[in-house]
Image (spheres, helix red, strand yellow):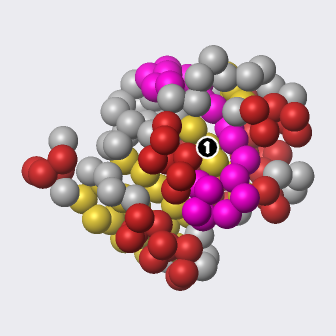
Amino acid sequence: MDMAKRIVMDAKIDYPAACNAMETLLVHKDLMKTPELNDILVALKTAGVNLYCGPVAHKVLGYPKADSLHLEYSSMACTVEIVDDVQSAIDHIHRYGSAHTDCVVTTDDKVAETFLRQVDRCCRIIQREYKILRWCSFWTRC
């Protein structure tokens, strides 16, 4: 989760108005009540990020509900939502995402492969321990 924390912090705080800044943090349901996720959320809040929740996460975390799940804040704000598995994350991305840049942080090769096969974006990023793999096709999509 240290790697996930570094990625999340950089993706939101480095340049929050960028078109590839993190707008939604999808969290696997098994991680919702872990101290590591709490550390990430506290770090975001401490850095000045306003946190909002999707309907499922609101019940668990208690942050205000997001006005919409299809929202680009372009500021120090983001939505947190809970997903059951990689397929529900992909479904969420297809339904609410901007079709620009999406990232999965995983140690599971099957999750990474599923993400790459099913998420069609300008830039798809898979972060695994010790290496980052990027598939970018800006010339065809953006």
Q: Relative to 59, say whether 75 is above or below.
A: above
Q: Relative to 115, say whether 36 is above or below.
A: above
Does residue 112 appear in the picture of this structure? yes
Q: Could you say where residue 135 lies in the image, as x and y percent from the top left?
A: 28, 65
In this view, the residue in front, 26 or 69, is 69
Q: Which residue is mark 1?
A: 25
Q: Quadrant of the N terminus?
A: bottom right
Q: Amino acid at mark 1?
A: Leu
Residue density around tag 1, few if under 14, some if 14–19, many if 20 or more, within 10 Å: some
Q: Could you say where residue 140 lies in the image, as x and y percent from the top left?
A: 12, 51
- Hey, which quadrant is residue 56 in on the image? top right
Does residue 43 appear in the picture of this structure? no
Left/right placement of residue 80 relative to residue 63 reads left
In this view, the residue in front, 105 or 116, is 116
- Hey, which quadrant is residue 133 in on the image? bottom left
* Residue extending farthest bottom: 109
Q: Could you say where residue 65 lies in the image, as x and y percent from the top left?
A: 74, 22
Mark 1 element type: strand
Q: Relative to 117, say whether 123 is above or below.
A: above
Q: Quadrant of the C terminus?
A: top left
Q: Could you say where residue 28 lies in the image, as x and y percent from the top left?
A: 72, 58
User: What residue is at 87 percent from the left and 34 percent from the top?
Assistant: 59
**Does the magenta portion include 84?**
yes
In this view, the residue in front, 130 or 67, is 67
Q: What is the magenta range?
A: 71-89
**Does the magenta portion include 50?**
no
User: What residue is at 62 percent from the left and 56 percent from the top?
Assistant: 88
User: What residue is at 67 percent from the left and 63 percent from the top?
Assistant: 85
